[in-house]
Amino acid sequence: MTYRAGWIHYTNVAPILDSLVLPPGVTAITGVPTQMNAALLSGEVDIANISAVEFIRNADVLEALPDFSVAVLGPVYSVNLFHTRPLPELRRIALTAQSAMSVALLEVLLREKGLSPVLERAEGDAESLLGSGYDGVLRIGDSALREWYQVVGPLGERATMTSLPSTGRGITVTDLACEWFDLTGHPFTFAVWAYRQDNPPPENLVQAMREARRDGIGHLAQVAARHAQRLGLPARVVQHYLWNFRYHLEAPDRLGLREFADKAVPGHAPLKFGQRPGVKVAG
Ligand SMILES: C=C(O[C@@H]1C=C(C(=O)O)C=C[C@H]1O)C(=O)O
């Protein structure tokens, strides 16, 4: 029997996926978050690095690998609200159809601030949507990273030594993961590797993923250089973007995930994780 994987292949997952060698009997397809979320839930694939909010909404049927995440503590640089007025004055925000997660996060943040602008689906890049009747535009993934750099760049060598800037060209870029940190003091977990509870991945696939991650993180400069070329961004900026991620679903990442679950999906089923590798159960 073939085991089918569905990978969201944004640059932030490159340190895990780029050197992954699939074991025999495992196949993989790729797509944007909303496609992979749907593919996992419909049974088209058996495991996927899905948006955490879909994992939470479907916690009754899904389980997640215990040691894989796409999370950050503070800014993420690629889940961005681009806007031309201060947040409290925003009236109409365009939302990307690629992500359920960032929309759920934006809704939580707006609610916490007591704001209620109109939210509408609309595709296009941030600057052209801002020029066509929207005062806010939510973007994620590689295009959000590129558009953030168009707004704040070009950045010299020194600029990447600390947090990166967030304004330029009359546009403010509000980083939603940073807002989450200001609100809770916790990391924000964007994605987990989930599967249906009755169909966990073969151990050799999980082991291959762990080896690929070790290799990717160990060669981050090379991973960054490769993707920088594709993205049209300076390699040091992409390297900064990548080293900022937390890929191991550690205790703080789970704390952030649980807090988000309670705020975004009240009444959700308990979140389930597979057993941590090397952890022996007493008794
Ligand atoms: C932070 C990001 O992470 C991704 C965001 C996701 C989402 O918004 O649904 C899903 C998977 C993550 O890898 C991003 O791509 O900007």
Image (cartoon, rainbow, N blue to C red):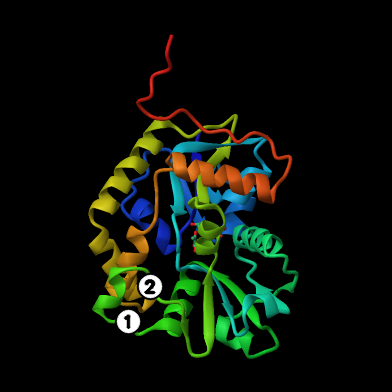
N-terminal label among 1 and 2:
1
159 left or right, relative to 93: left
Please indicate, yes or no, whether residue 48 appears anywhere in the rendered image. Answer: no
Would you place residue 254 above or below residue 94 in this image?
Answer: above
- Residue 89, percent across and down? 69, 80
Would you place residue 170 above or below residue 75 in this image?
Answer: below
Q: Nearer the viewer, residue 279 or 199?
A: 279
Q: Secondary structure at mark 2?
A: loop
Q: Secondary structure at mark 1?
A: loop
Which amino acid type corresponds to the residue marked 1 in the rendered image?
Leu
State yes or no: discs 1 and 2 in contact (Cβ < 8 Å): yes
- Residue 15, percent across and down? 34, 55
Q: Nearer the viewer, residue 125 or 264?
A: 264
The circle on residue 124 is: none
- Residue 107, percent across and down? 68, 62
In which quadrant of the rendered image does the C terminus lie? top left
Q: Say which residue label 2 marks.
A: 164
The answer to whether mark 2 is within 8 Å of ligand 1 is: no
Q: Quadrant of residue 85?
A: bottom right
Please indicate, yes or no, whether residue 5 appears anywhere in the rendered image. Answer: yes
Are there few (<14), some (14-19), or many (20+) residues within 10 Å of tag 1?
A: some
The circle on residue 155 is: 1
Q: Quadrant of residue 80?
A: bottom right
Which amino acid type corresponds to the residue marked 2 in the rendered image?
Leu
- Residue 197, percent across and down? 59, 31
Say which residue appears at 24% left-offset and 63% top-offset: 221
Are there few (<14), some (14-19), or many (20+) residues within 10 Å of tag 2?
A: some
223 left or right, relative to 34: left
Q: How many marks can you see?
A: 2
What is the distance, in whole Å, between disc 1 and disc 2 at their CAs?
A: 9 Å
The answer to whether mark 1 is within 8 Å of ligand 1 is: no
